[in-house]
Image (cartoon, grey):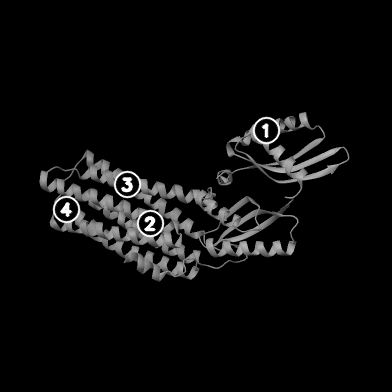
Amino acid sequence: MLEGYLKRRTPNPADQRVRMAMGKEASILGIAMNLGFATFKIGVGILTGGISMIADGMNNLMDMLSSAISLIGFHFASMPADSNHPYGHARMEYLASFLVSLIILWTGGSLMWQSVKNIINPGTIDATPLAVAVLVISIFGKLFLYRYNLILGKRLDSELLVATAYDARGDVFATGAVLLSLIATSMFSVNVDGWMGLIVSVIIAKSGWETLRDTVDTLLGQKTDPELLRAITRDIKSFPVTLGVHDLMYHDYGATHRFLTLHVEVDSEKDVMDIHQDIDEIERHIEEKYHMDATIHIDPIRIDDPRSNALYDYVKANLRAIVPTSDLHDFRIVDRKDGLNLVFDVLLPMNLEQKIKDIDEELKDRVAKDHPEYQLLTIYDMDYQDLLEVKNE
């Protein structure tokens, strides 16, 4: 039911207006529910002397502040591009997620300190039916917020909403721990309030750290999802014009502002206007399916030249003898008076970046033993995106 509702509300998840409207709705819902949870938990915690319940209420108060930051983040992320920010402001979602994670970490740390003090000097706690009812209602409410934000976050491809969802899931376990504390006090007269508060604080801090780590990775420019690269590469290779794909570069400026540049190898004997039309079709396909602005550079190669094909196979065999997981592309021959220039690019695994010079020398030595008249002009690229795994599938 909830998934169907959110699908109806987001007919076009890539539409910036839809993202803004649903982001605001999720944020306002989070503000309202967390304010209610925090008010009741802190109030009941003060009345009953339950430090773990007050800690849980403070956590909800920080969740409310996080939702307010999310609301502001979605607002600024929807602002159009300007002269100083030609790629738009969609990364404001990531900055908002960064601030939210810091708030979560601060909350976990401060509540951990209070819980340790309560363990050292335990107080008294009154387990009342009202306290139990508040916690049970809160658990169901947080389960709803978890499902709501997770479904919506994945549909809108929003790290901020997904982070909010996992924070709500952590709150379910945290509030469950508080509930166990009250039950233990009521049934066994055992005060484990401080220990439960400590558990709550650890859960909060862990959630904050994971959110911070993921957000920082995105801001710094983390490696593109290999499954996404595989899907894009398979789609591009399905077009008849494509003979090979390499040099994929992915740039993330926010969920609705993503750019892809790549090289496609094509038959040099085909009409350039026909090739241009086919490449335009590939770019439109990527835009429609993956919501990325693609720019494709064409690399013409000769596929019907026996000499070129033989030399390509010869160089590749020598390269693979040195580095079995490597690959080469953009291979071409330039005639000289006293021999040949073999010009090509090599793609190497990242762990070999410090060995490029050794690999280059060994490759040149191997070729020179057979053909001293050949000169290798090589550019070495590192496989930052696991493209070799895609090529070798």
Viewer-proximal residue among 149 and 316: 316
| Residue, disc 4 | 48
| Residue, disc 3 | 203
Q: Is residue 145 visible?
A: yes
> Which image quarter is the C terminus in?
top right
In the visual, does 314 lie left or right of 284?
right
Say if mark 3 contacts mark 1, CB within 8 Å.
no
Mark 2 element type: helix
Which quadrant of the structure image shows residue 351?
Answer: top right
Q: Earlier in the sequence, mark 3 or mark 2?
A: 2
Q: Amino acid at mark 1?
A: Ile
110 above or below 12? above
Numbered tag placed on residue 292 in the rendering: none
Q: Residues within 10 Å of mark 1 (few under 14, many from 20)?
A: some
Q: Earlier in the sequence, mark 3 or mark 1?
A: 3
| Residue, disc 1 | 359
Q: Amino acid at mark 2?
A: Thr
Residue 312 in percent (x, y) is at 72, 42
Residue 42 in percent (x, y) is at 24, 56
| Residue, disc 2 | 164
Front tag of 2 and 1? 1
Q: Is residue 124 visible?
A: no
> Which image quarter is the N terminus in?
bottom left
Q: Amino acid at mark 3?
A: Ile
Viewer-proximal residue among 338 and 36: 338
Q: Residues within 10 Å of mark 3 (few under 14, many from 20)?
A: some
**Distance between the Cα atoms at labels 3 and 1?**
48 Å
Q: Residues within 10 Å of mark 4 (few under 14, many from 20)?
A: some
Q: Earlier in the sequence, mark 4 or mark 1?
A: 4
Number of numbered discs overlaid on the protein picture: 4
**Distance between the Cα atoms at labels 2 and 4?**
30 Å
